[in-house]
Image (tube, rainbow, N blue to C red):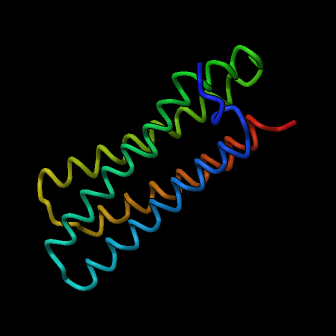
């Protein structure tokens, strides 16, 4: 069973907007530290950004899959294909996070490849949220 915030468009949208704006803000901070050559702050900002994606965005995705999507499927089985696609978006975000972690284990330097993956997370998350709101909360 999912919480009431996941089942109401206005609160669900607020969760999405808060998660995305926080990710963008933290990504911008990371970029500033990279541009300033603040090596220690770059490492800390990258760690915080990764943690943010896992604890704020991916945990929200987990909650959706564990409760909300199951409820939607029970109420509207015709949305099965849409739910599968939305779940795939979550998987793509998980893959990107895992890729960033693997790259940092090899070399902790925040490379252009890592920054591309962070930007990819933002794009996937933004598109996912918009489509989820459109598909699952339409009248």
Could you tell me which residue is drawn at 69 percent across and 32 percent down? 7
Which residue sits at x=53%, y=40%?
A: 89
Q: Residue at x 67, y 41 (%)?
A: 132
The picture quadrant where one finds residue 79 is: top right
Q: Position of residue 76 (x, y in %)?
A: 77, 19
Measured as percent of width and height from the top left, residue 52 is found at 37, 52
Q: Is the N terminus in the top left, top right, bottom left or bottom right quadrant?
A: top right
Q: Looking at the image, which residue sits at the far top?
A: 74
Q: Nearer the viewer, residue 118 or 58?
A: 58
Q: Is residue 109 above or below residue 74?
A: below
Image: 26 above or below 95? below
- Quadrant assignment, res 23: bottom left
Which residue is rendered at x = 60% and y = 46% of the image?
128
The quarter holding residue 32 reads bottom left
Please indicate whether residue 73 sits to the left or right of residue 25 in the image. right
Q: Position of residue 67 (x, y in %)?
A: 57, 22
């Amino acid at each position: 069973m999912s919480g009431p915030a996941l089942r109401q468009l206005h609160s669900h949208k607020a969760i999405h907007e808060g998660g995305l704006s926080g990710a963008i803000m933290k990504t911008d901070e990371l970029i500033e530290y990279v541009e300033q050559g603040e090596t220690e702050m770059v490492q800390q900002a990258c760690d915080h950004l990764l943690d943010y994606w896992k604890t704020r965005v991916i945990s929200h995705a987990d909650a959706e899959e564990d409760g909300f999507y199951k409820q939607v499927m029970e109420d509207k089985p015709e949305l099965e294909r849409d739910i599968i696609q939305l779940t795939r978006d979550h998987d793509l975000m998980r893959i990107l996070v895992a890729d960033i972690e693997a790259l940092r284990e090899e070399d902790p330097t925040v490379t252009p490849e890592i920054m591309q993956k962070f930007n990819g997370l933002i794009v996937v998350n933004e598109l996912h949220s918009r489509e989820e709101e459109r598909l699952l909360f339409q009248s």
